[in-house]
Amino acid sequence: MLWALLIRLNCYEGSDVSHALYDWSYARQMLYIRTLEAAGDASGALKEVFGRDFLVRRPLLDAIEYDDVVPPVLLVDEIDRADGEFEAFLLELLSDFQITIPEIGTISAKQRPVVILTSNRTRELHDALKRRCIYHWIGHPSLEREIAIVRARVPGVPEVLAAEAAAFVERLRTLDLAKAPGVAETLDWTQALVALGQSELDAEVVDATLGSVLKYHEDLQRVRDHGLQQLLAEAREAAARAG
């Protein structure tokens, strides 16, 4: 079986070339120049300090220069958190898979990496970028799958609690909420319930910890108006069927 190296680029507001592609190690450059000056030999320092020995590699450069039988997988995570300027830069780079570092020259990929971009739709991506992608929507997992995730990610969670928590969150997603809870909220909530020593759900604890799952006041009120007891009964029934 052949394994591919995963190279991950986490995007955020203000992401730029120095974060994603490359930067210079200014501290090492200054130390090198001062060392040469102390030795009385600083004539070629400027040219030398902008060589590969002082280059700080970032994920995009690692992906382009990766040289192995199996191409790497480049994960550009949450591209929607970066601004449009960075998105345009990324689009150009991923079209040619080459970059030019003025002090070094042009670097082209020997083999193109497999690129995966993720987005939480905090903003709409440019059409030019979307045209170059195969779109895939990842929805919420099935109840059985989510229970398995909870049991794997929350050590020591009682089996009944894992099933009931996952089933309760699944019931919440059927309501008209401003922000439906994801798997991350299920895990956070389950960890809180385990820390409280719960082995199963009860209405009082659910009401007290619901802020771990829902992050809008309107959603909390909507769930309470719908009826916690009813949701809890439905969750227990679904959890029992899921095993």
Image (tube, rainbow, N blue to C red):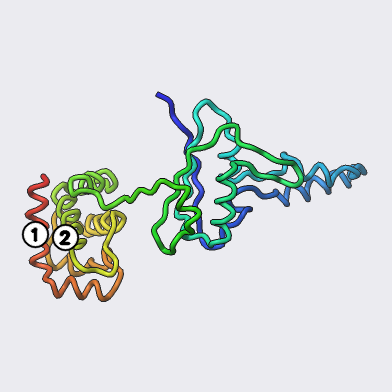
Numbered disc 2: secondary structure = helix
Numbered disc 1: secondary structure = helix
31 relative position to 190: left or right = right
Dot 1 alpha-carbon crowd within 10 angstroms: few under 14, some 14 to 19, many 20 or more: some
Dot 2 alpha-carbon crowd within 10 angstroms: few under 14, some 14 to 19, many 20 or more: some
The mark that comes first in sequence, 2 or 1, is 2
Q: Split into 4 quadrants, where in the image is the C terminus?
A: top left
Q: Position of residue 21 (x, y in %)?
A: 61, 48
Q: Nearer the viewer, residue 27 or 238?
A: 238
232 relative position to 122: left or right = left
- The residue depicted at 54 percent of the width and 56 percent of the height is 87
Tell me the quarter of the picture where residue 210 sits.
bottom left
Q: Split into 4 quadrants, where in the image is the N terminus?
A: top left
Amino acid type, callout 2: Arg
Q: Are marks 2 and 1 in contact (CB under 8 Å)?
A: yes
Q: Nearer the viewer, residue 29 or 104?
A: 104
151 relative position to 199: left or right = right
24 relative position to 206: left or right = right
Amino acid type, callout 1: Glu
Q: Position of residue 173 (x, y in %)?
A: 21, 61
Q: Which mark is residue 234?
A: 1
Quickly name the residue at label 2.
171
Q: How many marks?
A: 2
